[in-house]
Amino acid sequence: MARRDDEDHDLRQDDRSERPPLALIVGGIVAALAVVFVFQNTGDTTVNFLWIDFDSTLWFVIVLSIALGIIIDRLFAIWRRRSHRSDD
């Protein structure tokens, strides 16, 4: 009887290892939604930032904002990891 339980456990482990992680699935959905959002917003706009004013397409502003958000997130994650290491 114990042998059968071990085999079932091994099969469940194999099934889990073949599935993509939940974070990857959610990230893919968010990325797909971002692409749809970019393609639906292709008009021209004026960007005002501090003393800089320029005309651009809205999709470029959206992509730039997403890229800056990712960069800020990664920098914050690096800073947080380093601050936790120095606490140890």
Image (cartoon, helix red, strand yellow):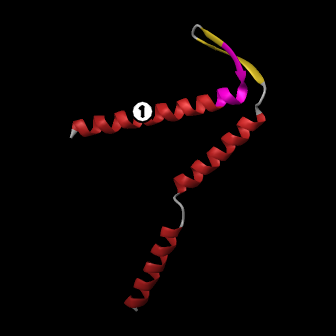
Judging depth in this view, the residue of 37 and 1 nearest the camera is 37
Residue 48: quadrant of the picture = top right
Tell me what residue is drawn at x 77 percent, y 36 percent. 40
Tell me if residue 61 is in the magenta stretch: yes
- Give the magenta part as a residue range: 54-62
Judging depth in this view, the residue of 60 and 1 nearest the camera is 60
- How many numbered marks does the figure carry? 1
Tell me what residue is drawn at x 77 percent, y 30 percent. 42
Where is residue 16 drawn, in percent x and y? 50, 69
Tell me if residue 26 is in the magenta stretch: no
Is residue 75 found left or right of 50 in the rendered image? left
Where is residue 1 drawn, in percent x and y? 40, 92
Residue 10: quadrant of the picture = bottom left
Tell me what residue is drawn at x 35 percent, y 33 percent. 79
Give the amino acid at mark 1. Answer: Leu
Residue at the extreme bottom: 1
Q: Residues within 10 Å of mark 1 (few under 14, many from 20)?
A: few
Tell me what residue is drawn at x 47 percent, y 31 percent. 72
Residue 58: quadrant of the picture = top right
Where is residue 25 drawn, in percent x and y? 58, 54
At numbered mark 1, what does the secondary structure look like: helix, strand or loop?
helix
Where is residue 73 drawn, in percent x and y? 47, 34
Picture layout, residue 54 above or below residue 74: above
Judging depth in this view, the residue of 30 and 55 nearest the camera is 55
- In what quadrant of the picture does the C terminus appear? top left
Picture layout, residue 23 above or below residue 8: above
Residue at the extreme left: 88
Q: Which residue is mark 1?
A: 75
Picture layout, residue 21 above or below residue 6: above
